[in-house]
Amino acid sequence: MHSDPARPRVAVISYLNTVPLIWGLENGPRRHPFHLDYCLPSEGADRVQSGADDIGLLPVIEMARQSLAAFPGSGIACDGPVRSILLISKVAPAQIRTLAVDRGSRTSVMLARVILSRKFDAHPAITVSEPLLDDMLANNDAALIIGDPALHLDPAALPFLTLDLGQEWKELTGLPMVFAVWCGRPQFVTPANSQHFLDSLSYGERHISTIVAGQAAQRRLPPDLIHTYLTQHIRFRLGDNEYRGMQTYLDFAAALEPALEIK
């Protein structure tokens, strides 16, 4: 597919935690510098790989697998509990033999594999499922629920062991966890495009109350939960510590998946 270098095609994720990152692209004074395609994280990765899109807010595991260039300074990260990535199990973590996962994010699936392997010496078989907890647990020991479906669950009310994988990663490494970054084919990773993404985030941060109100109605989630999630659980600014956490994650992933080439 032919792309216009002056207006690249950008795959953006339709989860709540992406809204501040793209708020300025949609609503800011310099809106629409890109053509935006909305999709799941895994779909965005496929769109960039196929050439349908030039840039994406992609799982970091896909950035590594596709040897894409990253835009600096912003993404989706946490430094402790993330709230939206939950591993829910009927058995103790060391006893998990089968894990049902949502097809939504490949980074989160690899994170679950890393944590189960390194913390609990568990290496479950993975099955892909729709994010319906009862169905996922019907034939599996555990389920990985991510994104908005996880926010609709109350971990304290579930009759199962529930691990927040952001917290588990922090306990394992002492580092932040980076889930997604803006990345793309190198010719599109320019200073001008980088600035568009940083400006968009700054605009979103200045309008967080507007975002919370609108998203609460749209996603049928309590405003206080959304505000806490976007201002305390999720980190959008990436610095040296976040990048150390990202590299540690990629190193651990490569150890589990030797064919993964980390550039």
Image (cartoon, helix red, strand yellow):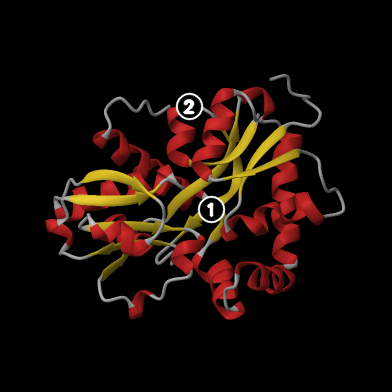
Give SS at disc 1: strand
Residue identifier under label 2: 66
Most extreme residue toward the top is: 2
Residue identifier under label 1: 76
Q: Is residue 157 above or below residue 182?
A: below
Q: CA distance from mark 1 to mark 2?
A: 19 Å
Is residue 174 among what the camera can see?
A: no
Nearest the eye: 27 or 72: 27
Q: How many marks?
A: 2
**As drawn, is 202 to the left or to the right of 12?**
right
Where is the N terminus found, in terms of image quarters?
top right
For the residue carrying disc 1, how many other residues have a C-alpha within 10 Å: few (<14), some (14-19), or many (20+)? many
Nearest the eye: 214 or 177: 214
Residue 62 position, x and y percent, is: 46, 35
Residue 186 position, x and y percent, is: 62, 24
Of labels 1 and 2, earlier in sequence is 2
What residue sits 52% from the left and 35% below the top? 45
Q: Which picture quadrant has residue 247?
A: top left
**As drawn, is 187 to the left or to the right of 165?**
right
Q: Report the amino acid beneath label 2.
A: Gln
Q: Report the amino acid beneath label 1.
A: Ile
What residue sits 37% from the left and 56% below the top? 175
Q: Are marks 1 and 2 in contact (CB under 8 Å)?
A: no
What residue sits 15% from the left and 50% below the top? 97
**As drawn, is 212 to the left or to the right of 192?**
left
What residue sits 57% from the left and 56% below the top? 15
For the residue carrying disc 2, how many other residues have a C-alpha within 10 Å: few (<14), some (14-19), or many (20+)? some
Nearest the eye: 103 or 242: 103
